[in-house]
Amino acid sequence: MKMNHLRLGSILRHQACSINTQLVRSNATATPVKTGNDRANSARTPSSNFAKTGSNSGRWTKKTFGERGKQDYTRIGLGTQKESQFERARKQLIQKHSEEFTLESQSIFNVLEKVEYYNSCWKQDIESAISFIKDPKFDGKLLSDRQCAVVLKMTGEMNSQLNHEVRNTFTDQLFNLLESKKANLGVQSFNAWLKAKYDNGCSVDIVKFYETLAKKEIEPNVETFENISLNHGRNGDANGIIQLIQTMKEYEMGASTKIISSLVYAFASTNQIEKAKTIMGSFESKKNIINFNELTLSFIKGIAFSGKFDLLQKCIIELGKELDLTQAENTALLFEPLYLFARSSNNTEQVEKIQELIPKTLTAASSQYDIAIGNFYSKILHILNGNNIKLAITLFKSLPESFKFQAQKVVNIVFDRKVKSNADVNEILEDANLMRLGGINQIPLLFAVQEARSGNSSRFYQLFAAFKKSPEYPPFKDRFFVKNIEVGMMLTELHNIKIFDNQVTKFTDIYVLLEQTEQNTTMYGSFEIDMFKKIQENMIQKYLVHDKPFFDRFSALVQKETNLSPEHMKSLFIKNYGISFEESIKSNDLEKAFDTSIKIGDINDKAFGHLDLLVASFKARDIQLFQKVIDQSKKMNSEFSVNIDIAVAFMELGKYELADKTLSQIPYLRISPKKLAFIVTREKRKGNVDVLKHLLRLVYQKRWVESVQLNEMAMSIVNMYVAIVLAIALGVVVAGHDSLYESAYAGIDTNDYQGYFNENDGKWNVNNYYNPYHNFHSHGQQAAHDPFFGLGNFNINDFYAMKYFKFSGYSEESADKLCTEMKYLVDGSTYLTYYCKYINGSIVGPDAPKYPIVSDANVPTPKST
């Protein structure tokens, strides 16, 4: 559609406003710009009044553009660049406290500063921005037009973590949020929105875009037209760009490098090569105002999009003569042409030949390279989103090593999705081969087989047969878990809680599978029909434990067809070994329990039940068995793990000194998060609060684990105290606790400490001398007469202490226990440290507060200081 967009905008603006109003460049609230093909309301009569009204500051003059043209855009090998307002603001932020950017953002402004400083963002940054803007208390008018633009830029090329579809969803969500909050959406914001849409590969109805600007009285600038030209160029609309340039000339505006580049791209991408070369030739002598290298690059992108392999090769070689492509910032220029050619040709052999012309840079040399490589990665994700694993793996080869793990993770996720979606088996086999060759995953078919077990049987047969012929099978053919795949499908039915008729049919099919895959004699005929009835009756535990003839016959049949050893066959029923172990421990048959533990350990290749055996053998004074367990554990675990188990066993026996001595024998001891989680879960299940307390004190003093695990342990202890107190109280109101009231925060991990305290005000936080927070509600944290004045903010340790006081009551005994037995909480809180040191009297000091306490019959008096 040929039309003068500027003149069209004037008509739309006047019709919307009904009066001649002055254009406003910013601080206007915008509506979401809708995309699509609906242009029913766009046919308006052109007018010459658009952009001629308004203040002088808003007028576009030839002089203004001329100054811009002499210093135009990104330096690409040659030429200079005029810094954008965005880039200048970013550099100013360098002067600020950069270390603050490593902390958690406290407001939308923190997010924006961090994003501008790094010139990139992550998904968490976008989600934080959404959270802050959605806050009912947030005033959108606090955000300037430029800041709104930064918010929208975050959803475009600034983010290299997400694919295009996800980024575009965030673009729309943030734009709608900003509008609903009446933020100052001006020309910069709309430019950022349009560019984000372009970055995310979305089509934009330019006529409707102009209509929105006109209704909001927002005057476009050169950047607006540049972004419009990008959209025209991607659509191959050269005529639209030519018309845009002619319109700009009428209003004393010249075309910038970006607009001319878009024109070159539009011609080249639609096979109008000679026209593209003519445009480039007309500007070859005007390198003082046009960046010719950017025109060349646009030409390369255009022929890459059109899929012209030979011409693309030739152009990249010629470009290498002009620019040093071994430099990272120049290498980055060729990522987009590579992507465009890959999408258009879908020929991996040709793509690999183009890749050979692009030097692989291992480390980044500039922020420009970081942005380019990030955008390239995001584009590959877009390809993967279409399940084209073959092409994506080929392109991943161009990424630096730092992207390798990320690429492997994403490819494996997409491969898993294809397997689950019943994709063609041949396509899965081809992808699996590429994943092996590309170093993405050396056993993709093994995962595919296991995933396909729950799906279509015939499809599983094909994948399993391919797996056995693949290079993945030989290293695993004698491993138990692979043999388990061969018989696992039939055994799945044996462990089901409920067996249905259709599963019985499937059970029969699995025996046919064994015949097909092992190429052995038919076993279906030897399988008696009464076995199906027994499975239907859901009596498998009875069969396995009591019906020995059935078990032996079943075992012999499976061993014959799969070559499983008798030990491996028994291991398929490892659950029964576990039951046997527990029964042996309870009946004090420790030798049998030890033998069972060894059997399970041999099957799983890891220790089983050693901690239970250590405790039981020590209680039984069986020192010989105690040592046998230790020796067996040393065969399967590290020295760290063995000593930790011995120490925990001593703790469960109440031998805390022996536990400390055991742990002290190993210097530089560390407890893995997985090991600690196992111990905490075990002690919580057993209700051993004293063990948890002692262990927590040790790991806190030695700094064996991260603070987050200390918090989890502390919360476990507090919750166990709560359970104990509630069990004793049986609904009786303890000191200051209203048993009929339950906080919405109780039992929930939260950072909203202020909300937690306020919500419980007057309900359980009573004015008790032994409660270190008793003045908080009456006078506030910064009350001048509060003895805690100036001690800082509340933190997670205070939260746990408050919960402890809530359920244990406020008394001299509970206060002493807090200060002496919960040092891990006290040391982490300035309030609790001050309280325990001076007020509660654990340590008497000269600075103890001397303020009066109103005595009450129900409130205990303080200790003498």
Image (cartoon, helix red, strand yellow):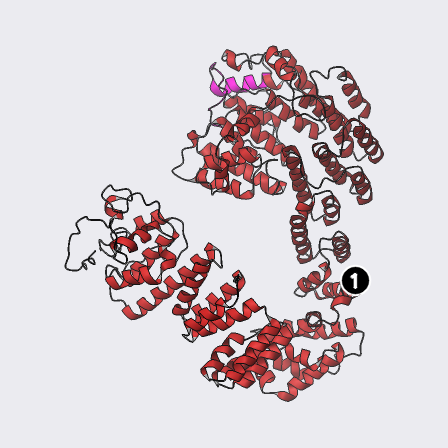
Q: Is residue 406 magenta?
A: no
542 or 15: nearer the viewer: 542
Q: Residues within 10 Å of mark 1 (few under 14, many from 20)?
A: some
Name the quadrant containing residue 201: top right
Task: Give the left or right position of residue 236, taking residue 864 as reference.
Answer: right
Vertical arrangement, residue 865 with respect to residue 779, above or below:
below
Name the quadrant containing residue 819: bottom left
Q: Quadrant of the C terminus?
A: bottom left
682 or 290: nearer the viewer: 682
Q: Which residues are magenta?
A: 7-30
Q: Which residue is mark 1?
A: 471
Is any part of residue 15 visible from this angle? Answer: yes
Count all numbered tags in the image, as a single digit.
1
Of all residues, the one furthest to the bottom in this rendering is 549
Task: Give the left or right position of residue 706, taking residue 64 as reference.
Answer: left
What residue sits 81% from the left and 33% below the top? 312
* Helix, strand or loop under label 1: loop
Residue 472 image point, x, y percent? 76, 63
Vertical arrangement, residue 802 with respect to residue 608, above or below:
above
Residue 38 image point, x, y percent? 60, 31
563 or 627: nearer the viewer: 627
Task: Give the left or right position of residue 186, taking residue 268 as reference.
Answer: left
Residue 663 image point, x, y percent? 49, 68
Vertical arrangement, residue 194 with respect to residue 419, above or below:
above
Residue 786 image point, x, y percent? 24, 45
What residue sits 80% from the left and 22% below the top? 277
Vertical arrangement, residue 842 with respect to residue 21, above or below:
below
Q: Quadrant of the N terminus?
A: top right
Amino acid marked by disc 1: Pro
What residue sits 80% from the left and 77% below the top? 520
Q: Is residue 17 magenta?
A: yes
